[in-house]
Image: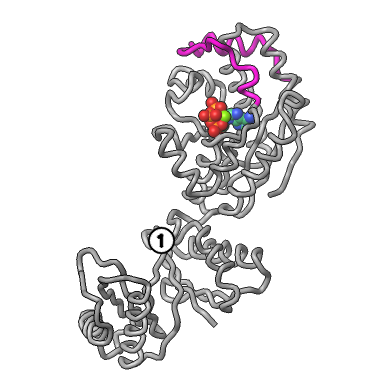
Amino acid sequence: MNTWLLKPGELSLKGGNRKSFEDVLKRNLLAMLNKAKPGMARIEFRSGRFFVHGAEEDSAAIENVLSRLIGISGWAKTHAYPKTAEDVMRACVAEGEKIHAAGIGTFKIEARRTDKSFPLDSYALRSKGGEVVLDAVPGLKVDVHHPEAIIQIEIREKAYVYSNARKGLRGLPVGTAGRGLLLLSGGIDSPVAGFLMASRGMGIDAVHFHAYPYTSAEARSKVIRLAEILGSYCMGIRLYVVGFTKVQMRIKETSPLPWSTVLLRMAMMDCAEQIARRVKSKCIITGESLSQVASQTIENINCTQSGITIPVLRPLIGMDKESIIRKAEYIGTYKTSIEPYEDCCVLFSPPHPILCGDPVEASRLYQALELKPLIEQALADCEKINI
Ligand code: ATP
Ligand code: MG
């Protein structure tokens, strides 16, 4: 039986609410483990740490869950050792041998003692641990400033020693900050926007607009796959797929061409707000980044949100494309996002789009489109997919 030790992240900052944050984290962890393989692991929560117990053969599946769990700052595979100084020192030597065999030359020891009855305090654990490792593993050196590996000792209800601590996704457990409705295109940006809000504890619903038959079935399947990847971090997603062909045709046929993208965005926001109200999402989330494209200048952003009465969150607003791409690679959506299927926006995008739309003019043009019945129909025909 193996044990994984998990450190809750920002939770430690929460005062009176802390327990409810821990409960959500526990619920998410259990649900993710059981989804990977029912009954695969047992979890335990003691004095500020989560412990996952599971079999060696399930290690990869358990670690896959831990690497996707929002709300922990780090985790490590470890063993529970008897709480004697000899056992702990023996475990330190074993870790020293392991890191040396992996080609590591420098280390330091970190120690934490929550059980104050243990005879060695954290200072003594560090110095004695360092000493026994140096004696037993020639070739290893101590470097307290820039060690290649850290051997960690935790003296709790049992003793834990490990050297393979991994960084967690940090943030707050999904489900502690309400729900938001993500405008999910098939592009690079919007899945990252959803991930960032999930990292702040927000549950994610998503809406995708397509213009079938101008957009393909492949484009739709791509969006579903993106929602699946995103959903693996945020406890699933309710995805609403809305046909917007008639809305787009109306805009194309009756509005000044330079305005078409801004008006389409306004229609998306309008429709999204209605879905958000129905499904009790508290805000709209988009992947907009300031001035990335013509429809995302500050003036045009002002046009697209006019008339919307719930908050519109744009977590990427100050990020450059390079950083967004890096984040997309990190969460695993990038490869899918760059598959070459057209988004409905691109299909009707004008050669010379308006750059600095006036919100009064935007509202006037939008009203003149009389989209209400078309949007109502689109909502009535909307497809719901539970991911
Ligand atoms: P992305 O990678 O998110 O597609 P982008 O750079 O292509 O970003 P735009 O196409 O201008 O940006 O879209 C801006 C935002 O509008 C998107 O991030 C997304 O939130 C929303 N959006 C665009 N197209 C759609 C769509 N077909 N369905 C739902 N939301 C959309
Ligand atoms: Mg897009």
Instruction: Please name whichever residue, 383 or 326, is drawn nearer the observer in this view of the structure.
Output: 326
* Residue occupying the point 41% across, 36% down: 322
Q: Give above or below for 48 relative to 24.
A: below
Q: Which residue is denoted by mark 1 in the rendering?
A: 167
Instruction: Please name whichever residue, 245 or 327, is drawn nearer the observer in this view of the structure.
Output: 327
Instruction: Please name whichever residue, 301 or 192, is drawn nearer the observer in this view of the structure.
Output: 192
Q: What's under tag 1, amino acid-wise?
A: Lys
Q: Is residue 147 left or right of residue 290?
A: left
Residue 242 x %, y %: 72, 31
Query: How many badges with numbers are in the image?
Result: 1
Q: Which residues are magenta?
A: 344-373
Residue 381 x %, y %: 79, 32
Q: Is residue 345 left or right of residue 161?
A: right
* Residue occupying the point 46% across, 39% down: 325
Residue 178 x %, y %: 55, 47
Residue 111 x %, y %: 29, 77
* Residue occupying the point 27% across, 87% down: 136
Q: For numbered disc 1, what is the local secondary structure?
A: strand
- Neighbourhood count class around disc 1 (C-alpha, 10 Å): few under 14, some 14–19, many 20 upward: some
Classify the position of ligand 2 by quadrant: top left, top right, bottom left or bottom right: top right
Quarter holding the N terminus? bottom right
Q: Give above or below for 244 relative to 32.
A: above
Query: Is residue 273 visible from the viewing direction of this image?
Result: no
